[in-house]
Image: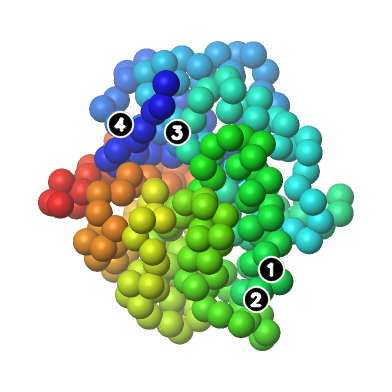
Amino acid sequence: MVLTIQGAGLGLRSCHEDFVLAECPAIPWFEILTDNYLRQAPPAMAKLEKLRADYPLTFHGVGLSVGSAGPLSPEYLQQLMALQKRLNPVYISDHLSWSFHSDHYLNELLPLPFNESTLNHVVHHINHIQEATQQCFLIENVSSYLAFCDNEMPEWVFLNQVAKRSGCGILLDINNVFVNACNHHFSAVDYLMAITPTAVKEIHLAGHEYVNNTVIDTHSCAIIPSVWQLYELALQRFGPVPTLIEWDNNIPEFSVLAKEAQQAQHYLDQL
């Protein structure tokens, strides 16, 4: 059965699992962090399967490392496919970044040089993922705090080309657009206007913090008005794209996250 998602969903965090399973809150869909469940014991998997019976799920990972110079990890991909078979996610997504070299995992989503060589390499890896999973993969733009001197194109051109050449979709993180626009001194609006509308399959929203003169994508606080305004503009361009609220640090009560989702739903309902 082909599943779809719509409306404003939430990223499920372990501290809220029991509440969601017991109360079945009126959230249209949930995203799980794939890497947290690749090697889970049967009790944890039983919770996920119960959740999947009540809600559509999406997978969001940090470990595929599509930008790494070496090949994708066969072990990681096999574990991902096993979880996919068990839970039938609507989407599988990861980040336009790299995080490991050889056997060294860096636990960071590191930026890529935006050039033709890297573009071809990323597209090759995404094609591999889509062939293995037999599913359209979504690639997310990441926040960054440095840029390569030999970039040949802006980030938004690179992101568009990845989607065009691989046939994957874009998971557009509006907060990351805002963060990078501040850190690298470009127009967030110009970025949004340059993205191919039909490629955007999902949107992420989150909070950030200022550290000295740098904006850090912390996922630790509420979404600020400037990001909400950018989100409203994005919806006007891309339509009612399913939207997810992320909150990973200083995680509040579930009701606080639900209010953020309600705010996103309010914007979606205006279309």
Q: Which residue is mark 4?
A: 28
Q: Which mark is residue 118?
A: 1
Q: Residue at x 46, y 55 (%)?
A: 170
Tag 4, which secondary structure? loop
**Numbered circle sitting on residue 148:** none
Distance between mark 3 and mark 1 Cα atoms:
28 Å
Q: Disc 3 designates what residue?
A: 90
Instruction: Give 150 or 252, whichever is nearer the viewer.
Output: 150
The front one of 52 and 221 is: 52
- Within 10 angstroms of label 3, few (less than 14), some, or many (20 or more) residues? some
Q: Position of residue 267 (x, y in %)?
A: 19, 52
Is disc 1 surrounded by few (<14), some (14 to 19) or many (20+) residues within 10 Å? Answer: some
Amino acid type of disc 2? Asn
Is residue 97 something that shows in the picture? yes
| Residues marked 2 and 1 touching at CB (< 8 Å) | yes
Residue 128 picture location, percent across and down? 68, 46
- Amino acid on which the number 1 mark rests in the picture: Thr
Circle 1: element type: helix
Which is nearer the N-term, disc 4 or disc 3?
Answer: 4
Marks 4 and 2, how far apart at CA: 39 Å
Checking the image for residue 115, the label placed there is 2
What secondary structure is marked by label 2?
loop
Q: CA distance from mark 4 to mark 3?
A: 13 Å
Disc 3 marks a residue whose amino acid type is: Val
Name the image quarter holding residue 174.
bottom left
